[in-house]
Image: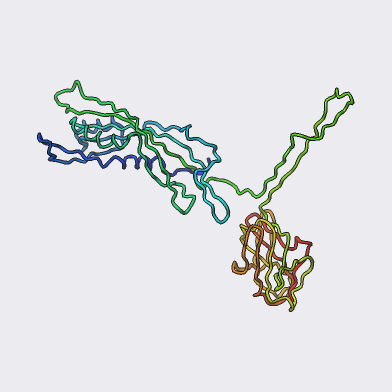
Amino acid sequence: MKDYTYSFEIKDLLTQFVAAFDDVVIKRYDKNRVPKEEISVRYVLAPKQRVMYDIVNKAQNLTLPVVAVNITSISRDTTRVFNKLDSIYNKTGDYGKSSLLMPVPINIEVSMSILARYLQDMDQILSNFVPFNNPYIIISWKEPTKVETQTVEVRSEVLWSGNISLTEPTDITYSEKFRVVADTSFTIKGWLFRNANEISQQIYFIDTNFISTRGDIIISDTNYESLFEVADIVETVSLSAIPTITNAFYNTSGGLLEITSNFTLNNTITSYNSYVIYGTNFSRTEAVLLSSSSNSSLTTTFSAISSKYSGLVSGYALNTSQYDVLSDNIITLDLSHLSGSGTFNIVVSNPAGWASTYDINSFTFTKT
């Protein structure tokens, strides 16, 4: 509610509606039914009463035939209402599936009034749209919130009421000109979309308690006359988006060597300098750091990462070419470019926070 929301949906739908009709041309025929003149029918967005006033008012340059289009009401279409969490568009990307949340289905009631001087003009105008609206037409427009870089097409049904009421003047003065009026209506089945920038917060933690409906039955009397008690069983499930590191391996020519204590890279196993890190929540990794000791000569360029949930950490930021996120659970690192000596930890950071290999048995890597 606090965010401004306006995407021109009603304006665009009405523009599309008029564009579907406004190329009507009528012809004037001679007694042999040979066309002698073509006239384009003018379409205006205005109530019928306003158009008739402009025709009567000599100062206005509005002549017949003319078609007046006007919105009479807008209502929510309950037949197209689904669960508000359902989506009408899904796309699978690098980080999972994104959805366009269900917009509000609306019915736009539109009146159309056709004003003509001759009955033959009226017949031609009706013949230009009635056969194509039996019982509806479809207009196509773009999803306006632009949640995706690609264009999402929205198709809306325009349902014709099927009724046309004709009115001819029966009591006019000598100064009034004869005109015939036809009134009909349409329903545009459109949508009102939520703003793509709707205020929301990222969810980083979920804590859920599950309470069982069955438990231990305790009988309090051997005659089974007393009531029994049911002990509730509560199970708590917690989910976190902060990455975790569970295992680290050194890649040697013979395979992966698990690191379980202080680890020294010596000259006998430095041909690869490649590591494999196991854990969780690696898919959204934003940075991988080498957090070195103060006496380290590995690097002198440090970057600091501040996290709301994990605090502050600093270290040497690896280039994206020096690590590869294979999955949500595996990252490989190539540290063959390192020179100098010192101790370090490997830090993996994502938008929720960061984790360090120091969490595994409090060990550090040592390069000599």
Q: Which residue lies at the image location 52% right of the left edge and 48% below the top edge?
A: 90
Give the answer, above or below, for where 186 lies relative to 367.
above
Asked if residue 190 lies left or right of residue 205, the reply is left
- Which residue appears farthest toward the top when viewing the image? 171
Q: Nearer the viewer, residue 47 or 97?
A: 97
In front here: 120 or 113?
Answer: 120
* Corner quadrant of residue 262: bottom right
- Residue 1, horizontal then vertical, whole percent: 53, 40
Can you give x and y, in whole percent of width and height, for residue 130 in the image?
28, 34
> Residue 102: where, in percent of width, then height?
51, 41
The structure residue drawn at horizontal position 20% and vertical position 36%, both measured from the top left corner, is 63
Check the image and report above or below for 334 versus 184: below
Image quarter where the C terminus lies is bottom right
Q: Residue at x 44, y 51 (%)?
A: 151
Apparent side of residue 339 relative to residue 12 in the rendered image (left or right): right
Classify 254 as above or below 14: below
Position of residue 40 in the picture relative to residue 367 (left or right): left
Kindly give the residue lying farthest to the left in the view shown: 31
Q: Position of residue 360 (x, y in %)?
A: 76, 61
Outermost residue on the bottom side: it is 267
- Give the vertical position of 322 relative to 195 (above or below): below
Identify the image quadrant of residue 214.
top right
Residue at 42% in and 33% down:
74
